[in-house]
Amino acid sequence: MSKLSERLKLYNKSLLPDMVKLKYEGMAENAFRFYRGTCHIFYEDLAQVKQFPGSPSTWICGDLHLENYGSYKADNKLVYFDLNDFDESILAPTAWELARIVTSIFIAFESLKIEPEKAYNMAQLFLKSYATTLAKGKATSIEPRTAKGIVCDFLTAAALTKEADILERSTDKKKKKLVLTINDVNHFKIPKHLRTALMEHVQHWIEHSSDSPYNYKVKDVVFRLAGTGSIGLKRYLFLLKSTNTKNKYLLVDMKQSRASALSPYIAIKQPEWQSEAERVITVQQRMQNVSASLLSATLFEDEPYILQELQPVKDTIKFKLIRDRYRDIYQVIDDMAVLAASAQLRSGGMNGSAIIDELKTFGAGSEWQEPLLKYCFKYAGKVKKDYQQYLDDYKNGVLE
């Protein structure tokens, strides 16, 4: 067994075995999908680098890559484009977040067969736009009225998506009652005793939590598969029905939380969170302009979970569809850089993060950009080699 496979099996051993098989299958799709599923390896390698640009400590989402930006419906019912995955969030050196996203540009663009020169230009653009936004010291947000280009089209379409459309995709009618579909490849039936316990737990959340929707009753629940890095965690989808509005339903996602993949490699003192779920939603609320609807933390059978309203499944920019449209790609990368800087500015000065003035000073400097860019370009080459090793191991059944 290769050292790579040993690292993968060790990290994933506490996850659901049947789901981990699906995770490994997904990671074999291409180098970018492999990269998304190996966040822990990225930071384990980064922690061993001796020559790496210094940077202020700030709150980071931890697993920032091109597909961890997307649309979501916020508490104020508006649709935003922003960072949207905070499972690995932690207080860490700013440059670590940048290394993760810039490396993802090199890997994703090669997987899409976009020329290396364009990939390098986009990586440079990301760092430049990020630094410029940070130096200004003012966070910004992107929603349909302020978006440009392809992001504007994307958000406009997302805003027009009706709750009924999402509900229709996720449910079936059974004996004149609405139930969650199990014909969806990402939905799985769960044992009766667990189903009952989950429904009772979420009903209790509805009745006693200030973050829950009012006047709803839990009608159904299924196991839900989503993402890449998070496959193997326990995750459930609930169907809720209004008790005072006819034919009104809600879909709620409940996802298990575990420690950030970065935590073994970060020496910076962290807050004493009540649970890993509290960590995730607290950092998410700090970094996003407006938080996702129904965002809440809960404990089920002594394990932490995050609850939130289900977001549309296809909520990320599909670069494959715009790979020949250079101007559109330019605008998207520029927006992503601005949002990364804005998220760090919003959370500046909180619980150990560098204050805004420190972040402005870092952004105004340029000496760190070229070394960071070179590291990411070189590491992308390592990821490609690791991916080939992974494919060999996967095809030979080493990971079974």
Image (tube, grey):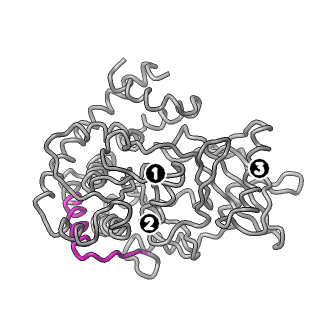
Q: Which residues are magenta?
A: 122-142
Say which residue label 3 marks.
Answer: 199
Residue at 42% of width from left, 19% of height from top?
396
Tag 1: residue type?
Glu
Residue at 44% of width from left, 26% of height from top?
9
Tag 2: residue type?
Arg
Q: Is residue 133 magenta?
A: yes
The correct choice, above or below, for 129 with respect to 196 in the image is below
Lateral position of residue 364 relative to residue 88, left or right? left
How much space separates mark 3 and mark 2, taking CA atoms?
30 Å
Q: Nearer the viewer, mark 3 or mark 2?
A: 2
Residue 272's label in the rendered image is 1
How much space separates mark 1 and mark 2, taking CA atoms?
17 Å
Instruction: Give the quadrant of residue 246.
Output: bottom right
Residue 286's label in the rendered image is 2
Tell me which numbered mark, 3 or 1, is placed earlier along the sequence: 3
Residue at 26% of width from left, 51% of height from top?
99
Spot the residue most to the right.
Answer: 175
Q: Secondary structure at mark 3?
A: helix
Count residues near mark 3 (Cα–Cα under 10 Å), then give few for <14, some for 14-19, many for 20+: some
Count residues near mark 1 (Cα–Cα under 10 Å), then give few for <14, some for 14-19, many for 20+: few
